[in-house]
Structures are given as structure tokens and as C-alpha cells.
């Protein structure tokens, strides 16, 4: 079974699978791959096969093999095809046994440049503007798996070039090691959560502080105090778009004045599946659908079909789209008065491009489909 498990890991890494889901059901365990953001059934295991895999995974990640009633979390690092790959392990009790989920964290390309990530010239210009400020709060937003960590790390790597800035991070977990950056892993078991770690780091004279995730008011209060004293702080929020980021800050109890004073830029992003170029077909969008999505009548777009090249999904690979919101005085004034409706109306007036707008552009350019825009 050890060979079978390693074969699963090797195949998942070669296919760029992001997660493995072992879902126990009545008399069977279904293994799913998450590929391009979608779950796909890979194979079915009998209970004995799954139990062997589960026991081995628990042993490798130093979890309690005998504990089946409580969730557990662990981590494994293996060498796959001469690369160190991290596997994040999570178990969860269900009515048919323990569900096992494994997130695959393949090493980030340390030579990845902003030009490689931001292929759209407008996005690249916005990114450079975002990291050019010497202080302020920059938030990268998106749901889990949207690529915001990669974008945030790219920003840190750019800032670290030349070794002229003191850059510190507080993370849970430290996903990738970054040169010229002092990275701190929080240790809640020993009393060092995000707030205490941020306090400690601020005593080390940082120019830039990266906090991997904002989880509560106490941590955000410390971040905002760092911003108003002249630091550049980069962090992330699990929200869908830029307006939601401002709303979340107010919801967790941050004063409107502090939120408005600190906010510099919010970068929201999501991933769209790319339509398979080998099997897609060109269609003329019907009038009603074009009107609904704000597209010209009679426009020709791509439609997904399915072939061997894309495992009959109609899609192959993914692309990131971005929404950059740089806060000016008018926007900050609206946040101070908690007028988020007014903020949204202001963005419409100035022609701000939302994620929906960027997804629409991707459909028109033939990169993706109406199905992905609807999602």
C-alpha cells in the first residue's frame, strides 16, 4: 500500500492536482482529485485499502493513529520528482468514518516575476503601483485556492530585491521560504498567536510586515497601528471582492476612521478555467444572454465541448483575473461615514473594473466561457 500511496502522490503532482479528497461512504471510499478547481472522481477503494492509507498518512504526519472521534491536522514533506512538496493533512469524523483531505503545496517558482503573473499590461501597472507606496495597508482578497498567497509572495519578493528593506512575516503556516525575509510561524500551543507574534515582530524595526491572514479584531488593530506609524503592511482576507473587504473590516469592529486611514489598496482575484483550444467551438451568443451579461448583440464566443486533451471537461488549465482598488480621498471619506453603498456608486461613476468586468473581457477574448462568467 505504501507504493500505491506514493503513486497517488506522484500522479497528483504531475497533473497539478491541488487537493485529494478521500470520502468514506457506506462500504466504499471515493478518492477525488481537485483539478482546475473542480472535483473529479479518481477511483474507489474498499474499506481495508482506505484504512491502510489513512493509518499510513496519520503516521507520516505524526497524528494520533488511534484518535477517530476528533478532527486532526498535520503536515508531510516528501520529495517528488526531485522537488520538495508539502502535503497538508486534515481528518474529519463522519458517519461512515474519517474523511481525509490532503492539500498539495508544490514549491512556488522562486523566479516567478510580476510580468509572468500579470500578463495583462493594466494589471502589471496596477501591481507596480500597489507595491510602490512606502506605507499603508494592502489586502489580497479571494476565496481559498484563488492564488492570493502566490500574488502576495510575489509582492514580497519584489520588495525584497536589493536587500534594502527590513521585511518580516507572521504566517500560519509558512507556505514557502522567501529570501531576505524573516518569516515567523505562529505557535498557538505555546501562546504565540497572531497578536503576540505581530507585537514581537514590530519590535524588530520592520519596513514591511506581511501577515498571512487577518482573523480577528485584535490582530487587525495591531496591523492598523503599524500602518499609521509608517509601515507597509500586506495581508489577506477571505472575501470575494474589494467592497467586501472594506465591509469585513467594519464588521470585525475596526473603527471606520482607522480603516479609512490605513487602507491603501485592495487586490481581489479569482481563477477562471481556460477553455480547451483543441475542442472548443465558436458560437454566436443569443440576444437575451448577451443583454444579461452586458455584451454586444451577435458577438461570437467560445463554447466548451470536451476531448481527450482536456479529459472531456472542455477546459484545460486556469487563468487569474484581478480587481485593483486604490483608495483615494473620496473613497476614504465614504468609508469614514460607513457609506458602502455610496462607495459602490462612486466606483461605477469612475469606471472601476470589477472581477465581473474582467471575466467578461476574458469571455470576449476567447479565453473562457459564459459558464465560467456565470460561476
Image: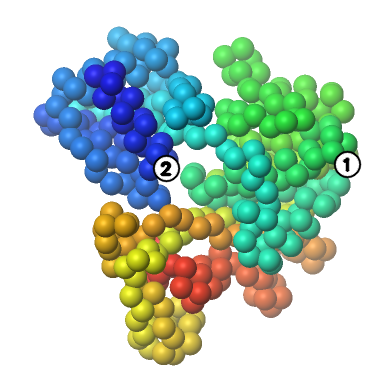
- Asked if residue 327 lies left or right of residue 82, the reply is right
Q: Tell us which disc is closer to us: 1 or 2.
A: 2
Where's residue 347, x and y in %?
A: 67, 71
Question: What is the quadrant of the N terminus in the image?
Answer: top left
- Asked if residue 308 lies left or right of residue 60, the reply is left
Mark 2, residue position: 16
Residue at (70% x, 26% y) in the render? 183
Where's residue 81, x and y in %?
A: 45, 30
Q: Which mark is residue 207?
A: none
- Among numbered discs 1 and 2, the one appearing first in the sequence: 2
Q: How many marks?
A: 2
Q: Residue furthest front?
A: 82
Instruction: Identify the element where label 1 is drawn.
Output: loop
Please say whether residue 173 is visible from this viewpoint: yes
Instruction: Identify the element where label 2 is drawn.
Output: loop
Please say whether residue 226 is visible from this viewpoint: no
Of 170 and 117, which appears nearest the observer?
117
Question: What is the quadrant of the C terminus in the image?
Answer: bottom left
Where's residue 87, x and y in %?
A: 44, 27
- Asked if residue 181 lies left or right of residue 57, the reply is right
Mark 1, residue position: 230
Amino acid at each position: 500500500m505504501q507504493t500505491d500511496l506514493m503513486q497517488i502522490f506522484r500522479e497528483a503532482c504531475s497533473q497539478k492536482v491541488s487537493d485529494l479528497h478521500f470520502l468514506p461512504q457506506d462500504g466504499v471510499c471515493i478518492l477525488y482529485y481537485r483539478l482546475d478547481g473542480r472535483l473529479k472522481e479518481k477511483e474507489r477503494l474498499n474499506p481495508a485499502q482506505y484504512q491502510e492509507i489513512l493509518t499510513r498518512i496519520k503516521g507520516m504526519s505524526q497524528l494520533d493513529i488511534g484518535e477517530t472521534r476528533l478532527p486532526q491536522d498535520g503536515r508531510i514533506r516528501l520529495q517528488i520528482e526531485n522537488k520538495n512538496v508539502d502535503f497538508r493533512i486534515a481528518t474529519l469524523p463522519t458517519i461512515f468514518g474519517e474523511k481525509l483531505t490532503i492539500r498539495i503545496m508544490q514549491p512556488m517558482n522562486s523566479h516567478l516575476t510580476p510580468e509572468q503573473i500579470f500578463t495583462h499590461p493594466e494589471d502589471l501597472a496596477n501591481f507596480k503601483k500597489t507595491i510602490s507606496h512606502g506605507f499603508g495597508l494592502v489586502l489580497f482578497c479571494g476565496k481559498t485556492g484563488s492564488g492570493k498567497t502566490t500574488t502576495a509572495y510575489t509582492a514580497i519578493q519584489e520588495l525584497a530585491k536589493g536587500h534594502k528593506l527590513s521585511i518580516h512575516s507572521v504566517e500560519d503556516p509558512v507556505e514557502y521560504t522567501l529570501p531576505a525575509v524573516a518569516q515567523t510561524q505562529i505557535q498557538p500551543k505555546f501562546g504565540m498567536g497572531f497578536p503576540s507574534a505581530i507585537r514581537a515582530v514590530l519590535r524588530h524595526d520592520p519596513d514591511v510586515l506581511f501577515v498571512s491572514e487577518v482573523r480577528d479584531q485584535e490582530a487587525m488593530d495591531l496591523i492598523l497601528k503599524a500602518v499609521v506609524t509608517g509601515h507597509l503592511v500586506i495581508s489577506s482576507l477571505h472575501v470575494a471582492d474589494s467592497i467586501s473587504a472594506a465591509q469585513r473590516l467594519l464588521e470585525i469592529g475596526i473603527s471606520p476612521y482607522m480603516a479609512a486611514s490605513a487602507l491603501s489598496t485592495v487586490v481581489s482575484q479569482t481563477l477562471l478555467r481556460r477553455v480547451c483550444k483543441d475542442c472548443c467551438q465558436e458560437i454566436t451568443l443569443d440576444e437575451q444572454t448577451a443583454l444579461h451579461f452586458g455584451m454586444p448583440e451577435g458577438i461570437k464566443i467560445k463554447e466548451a465541448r470536451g476531448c481527450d486533451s482536456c479529459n472531456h471537461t472542455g477546459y484545460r488549465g486556469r487563468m487569474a483575473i484581478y480587481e485593483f482598488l486604490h483608495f483615494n480621498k473620496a473613497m476614504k471619506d465614504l468609508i469614514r461615514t460607513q457609506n458602502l453603498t455610496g462607495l459602490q456608486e462612486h466606483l461605477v461613476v469612475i469606471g472601476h473594473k470589477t472581477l465581473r468586468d474582467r471575466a467578461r473581457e476574458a469571455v470576449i477574448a476567447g479565453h473562457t466561457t459564459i459558464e465560467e462568467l456565470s460561476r
